[in-house]
Image (spheres, grey):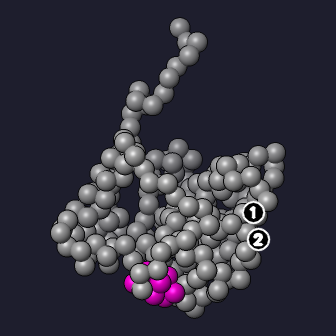
Amino acid sequence: MDIIDAVRSRKSIRGYKPAPVPKEILRKILDIARRSPSAMNTQPWDITVVTGKVLDNIRQANIELLTSGATPNPDVPAKPYEGIHKQRQVELAIQLFGLMGIAREDKEKRAEWMQRGFRFFDAPAAIILSVDRSVEELKAMIDIGSFAQTVCLTALNYGLGTCIEDQGVMFPEAVRKFTHIPESKRIVLSIAIGYPDWDFPANKLEAEREPVENFVTWCGFD
């Protein structure tokens, strides 16, 4: 697939077919992703790929913690969005709930939707990205983001869909219990990956992007 086509067609997939993703294909994707840029070639990413019983165990533990009222305690705490960024987040949620037929006042369906994120959107596999705590956090986040984007673009070449998400790792104790990722590693995010179910309503979402004129300042051009 042409790289420009890949960037334009990539989207967050929130519904997957149950078919497993072969380990060899995942290995090929990660082999390409290791070429991602990183500060001074530090390559700070540590990758854990989960599927099968291990992934099911993490899903179950996440949901048990969530429904028990436990407070998520991610290794990378998130600050709430404000202003235009919050507005875009709300607009996306409105679009998703509309496609899924979830009414604003339907708390049960809204809760069910939230649980999907903590289940990695029921994808057959997930890629968990961690980084050693000794690495300065801002630089690590930039490098991890670069790696994640490369994974998502490369996955398209194999007919796979992805969704970069943090809900699946918001209870790092659940992830560590079944993957044995050490406390010395900061669990940053996860990528749900699998074959898209194009009949799943949320996969029809086409998230809008701001035009170039709204976020670019040109300096020194005639």
Residue 129 on image: x %, y %: 65, 66
209 in the magenta segment: no
The stretch of residues the image draws in magenta is 60-67
Q: Residue at x 58, y 12 (%)?
A: 220
> Left or right of 188: which side holds 159?
left
Residue 140 vertical placement versus 16 (above, below) = above
Q: Residue at x 28, y 72 (%)?
A: 110
Q: Is residue 157 in view?
A: no
Q: Nearer the viewer, residue 188 or 215?
A: 188
Q: Provide the major secondary structure of the magenta segment.
A: helix
> Left or right of 128: which side holds 46?
right
SS for callout 1: loop
Q: Nearer the viewer, residue 78 or 124?
A: 78
Q: Earlier in the sequence, mark 2 or mark 1?
A: 1
Amino acid beneath label 2 = Ser
63 in the magenta segment: yes
Furthest-top residue in this view: 222
SS for callout 2: loop
Residue 222 vertical placement versus 172 (above, below) = above
Q: Residue at x 37, y 72 (%)?
A: 114
Residue 222 on image: x %, y %: 53, 8
Residue 61 on image: x %, y %: 51, 87
Residue 46 vertical placement versus 66 (above, below) = above
Residue matched to label 2: 184
Residue matched to label 1: 133
The answer to whether mark 2 and mark 1 are in CB contact below 8 A is: yes
Amino acid beneath label 1 = Arg
Residue 164 vertical placement versus 61 (above, below) = above
Q: In whole angstroms, how far apart are the C-alphas of marks 2 and 1?
A: 6 Å
Q: Residues within 10 Å of mark 1 (few under 14, many from 20)?
A: some
Q: Residues within 10 Å of mark 2 (few under 14, many from 20)?
A: few
